[in-house]
Amino acid sequence: MRAVTVNPGVADSLRLVEDHPEPLPEEGAILVEALAVGICGTDHEIIAGEYGEAPPGADRLVLGHESLGRVLEDPSGTLQPGDLVAGIVRHPDPVPCPNCAVDEWDMCRNGQFTEHGIKALPGFARDRWRLQPRFAVGLDPSLAPVGMLLEPTSVVAKAWEHIERIGARAEWQPRTVLVTGAGPIGLLAALLATQRGLAVHVLDRNTTGPKPGLVRALGATYHTESVCELDFEPDVVLECTGAPVVVLDVMYKIAPTGIVCLTGVSSGGRTIDLDAGALNRSLVLENNVVFGSVNANRRHWDLAAAALARADPSWLDALITRRVSVEAYAEAYTPEPDDIKVVLEFGS
């Protein structure tokens, strides 16, 4: 069968293998026919050789962690043949740490977790793959065109769950949300904010392309000025760029008792001037909270599936700016200026 693979740590080793072995039974009881995988910045970084880890005993890693497939067989009875399914990316570490022991592998404390298409587990960019039932998330049939968005949606579902948990520390009535960055994570974070009935503002540098229209279609406000120039103080910020200046600016901009959730990952290697004393004073005296959030556990995947099922299907479809067949895989992994979400398609 076909599989899109890399040699981890070797830049530009991406290739399509035509005779990749079938998935092994020990990978899971549920056999799935691949329909599509979404492509994100993590894939580009692995292709660049920045990180990635092949499964034990293998030289190459199958890419793909934003999955969508159709069940071929499931002897466990968890799903039925023909059902749409996505695979949870992260698996708990084998020790396990206290968090992994209770299925909160997104909060793994020892770093020994594994991840499909990223770290020591084969990804979903292959014609067929297998899942253990506990890592299989069924999808509503209406999500067939866009179900590969479940993985990034699970990330923001977790972020929102943790924001609301932190907010419950006191009487909390948030009204205004700022999302910085209008990539897939930012737009999906804005979607979940609008589903909560909040006034949503999205800030991004792009003045053209599909992003402004997608934000406005949610009933949200699109901004291109700097954070400092905004004329309001948000109660909640979801920072999705990882840009150091933006990260600092939102900490200063947040309203009293506000919450800043950092989901963007900074590349490091850059220094900027910082008045640490002023920042500390602001955070302490206004009871603000800044926290980081990454990945998701099964609970968040289920929340994400419900959120996508409630969303406007045409809006979700518009997030996918390119659909590329697996035969043209190199084209799919080559970024274009107006890309939001690129999808690699395997079949129908």
Image (cartoon, rainbow, N blue to C red):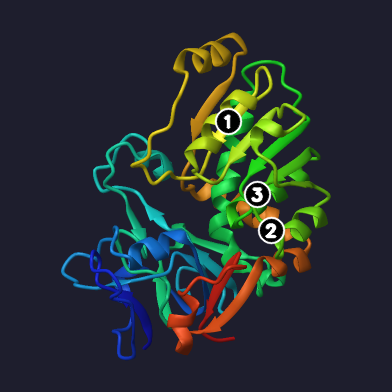
Q: Identify the element where label 1 is drawn.
A: helix
Place residue 11 in its image quadrant.
bottom left
Mark 3 vs mark 2: which is more N-terminal? 3
Locate residue 245, reporting x and y percent: 52, 36
Q: Which residue is mark 1?
A: 249
Check disc 3 and give the amino acid type: Asp
Mark 1 vs mark 3: which is more N-terminal? 3
Looking at the image, residue 248 sits to the left or right of residue 167; the answer is left
Check disc 1 and give the amino acid type: Asp
Q: Which residue is mark 2?
A: 308
Q: Which residue is mark 3?
A: 204
* Relative height, residue 77 to residue 255 (above, below): below
For marks 1 and 3, give the CA distance: 14 Å
* Relative height, residue 284 to residue 99 (above, below): above
Mark 2 vs mark 1: which is more N-terminal? 1
Check disc 2 and give the amino acid type: Leu
